[in-house]
Image: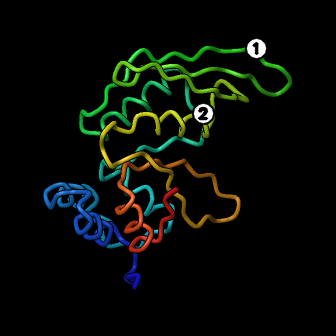
Amino acid sequence: MPNTSPMTYERVAVVLQEIGMVSKQKAQSVLDDFAAYAHDELKPYEVACTLVSFGLAVSVHADDIDYLEPGYAWLLEEAAAVTGGAVTVSDVRLHEGEFEGDSRDDVLEFRCNGRPVSIPAEHFSDEYYDQLAACDAIAEVSPDGDPRSFRLVDFARERHGVYDSIMVLTTPEQAQALQRDLGLTIR
């Protein structure tokens, strides 16, 4: 039966400890960092964002960024960090096509543990990620031989809201628990 307690940083910390995603020390460290509002009720998107705060997920910024190629490199480095060193990312390159109409077809390439990866990306501007391509690239950073993989976190959305995409590294069982206990949908 799902827990009906208000969603707070404190509640998220308890759930993440119960399902083995964070240690007691990590949970306490995050609660200390967010002590001023650890007991405040969170909206569904804020619950998803807590996974980034606990070091379990990567957030793909939905608003404008300064530069695409360094931005993708940073995202992939963040995803590799979430794996705890199980994955290394190198040689991140964005091969830009020509703008045709309102968009440009690009190719994001990188190496993941030495393996070449190529992801098609469509950019409407030099200042915004292709959310699908970014999420696909992060999914490629999932550790081999590990039951965990990067999955998209979905949540109830407010009308006209702009939301980052959140990618969490989780096992299938942990994904079910996040859905059951935190009200998140993990895809």
Residue 110, horizontal then vertical, whole percent:
46, 20
Residue at 30% x, 44% y is: 146
Identified by mark 2, the residue type is: Tyr
Q: Nearer the viewer, residue 41 or 164?
A: 164
In this orientation, which residue lies closer to the viewer: 60 or 146? 146
Task: Judge the density around disc 1: few (<14), some (14-19), many (≥20) Cα neighbours within 10 Å.
Answer: few
Mark 2 → mark 1, Cα distance in angstroms: 16 Å
Residue type, mark 1 in image: Glu
Discs 2, 1 touching: Cβ within 8 Å: no
Image coords of residue 64 (percent x, y): 60, 35
Q: Residue at x 64, y 65 (%)?
A: 158
147 left or right, relative to 133: left
- Is 10 or 174 nearer to us in this picture? 174
Number of numbered discs visible in the structure rendering? 2
Residue at the extreme left: 25
Task: Assign a secondary structure to mark 1.
Answer: loop
The residue lying at 73 percent from left, 29 percent from top is: 124
View extreme (right): residue: 101
Query: 38 left or right of 154?
Result: left
Left or right: where 125 falls relative to 79: right
Element type at mark 2: loop
Residue shown at the point (31%, 31%) measured from the top left: 87
Instruction: Find the residue positioned furthest to the front.
Output: 145
Question: Where residue 176 appears, x then y in whole percent?
Answer: 41, 66
Mark carried by residue 98: 1
Quadrant in which residue 142 is drawn: top left
